[in-house]
Amino acid sequence: MSGSEASEKTGCQGASECVAACEDLAAVFRALGHPARLAIVKQLATRKEACCGEIVNHLPLAQSTVSQHLQVLKDAGLLICDTRGRNCHYLLNREKLDQSETLSQGFWNALRSREEDMVGGELTAEKPQT
C-alpha cells in the first residue's frame, strides 16, 4: 500500500500525524481502561450532568475513589467540570467522545484494510476453519 493509500484509509496525512492520532486514542483508551470509569461515563450518558455525590450514590466506591476516577476522565478531556460554588457538576465532553470514536473507527478500519491487503501474502493470518 502506498503512502497516499495508507493516509486515505487511516485519515492521517503523514507519519507524525498518525503517531499523534495514536497517542490521542491511547490516552482515551487508558482513561476508559477501568470498569469504574466506564460506569461513570455510562451513567453520565443517561443524564445531562451530575455532581460527584450523585455519581457516588450509583457506584459501590468511596467518594475519594470516585473523585480520582473523575479526575482521570477530566484529564483525558472526556469530562467537562462546571464549577458552581463549591460543587463541580460533570458532563460528558461529547465533542471529545465523537473525536475519539472517529479515531477509534479509523484505527480499526486501518487494521482491517491492512489485513485485507495481506491476503495472498506471506504474513496472512490463517482464518479459523468452520
Image (cartoon, grey):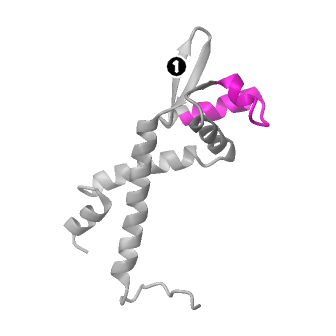
Residue 9: which quarter of the image? Answer: bottom left
The residue lying at 22 percent from left, 72 percent from top is 2
Residue 89: which quarter of the image? Answer: top right
Direction top: furthest residue: 85
Task: Check residue 56 for magenta coloring.
Answer: yes
Q: Nearer the viewer, residue 58 or 128?
A: 58
Residue 68: which quarter of the image? Answer: top right
**Whole-percent x, y for residue 93 in the image:** 47, 34
Numbered disc total:
1
Task: Using residue 81 as the reference point, say whether residue 34 is left or right of it.
Answer: right
The residue lying at 54 percent from left, 15 percent from top is 83
The residue lying at 67 percent from left, 28 percent from top is 67
Task: Using residue 123 as the reference point, say whether residue 32 is left or right of it.
Answer: right
Relative vertical location of residue 82 with respect to residue 22 in this rendering, above or below: above
**Range of residues picked out in magenta:** 51-73
Q: Nearer the viewer, residue 54 or 112?
A: 54
The amino acid type of the residue labelled 1 equals Asp
- Disc 1 marks which residue? 82
The residue lying at 70 percent from left, 25 percent from top is 54
**Whole-percent x, y for residue 110 in the image:** 37, 66
Where, quadrant-wise, is the C terminus in this rendering? bottom right
Q: Secondary structure at mark 1?
A: strand
Task: Check residue 91 for magenta coloring.
Answer: no
Relative vertical location of residue 125 with respect to residue 50 in this rendering, above or below: below
Label 1 crowd (10 A; few <14 / some 14-19 / many >=20): some
Q: Main secondary structure of the magenta part?
A: helix
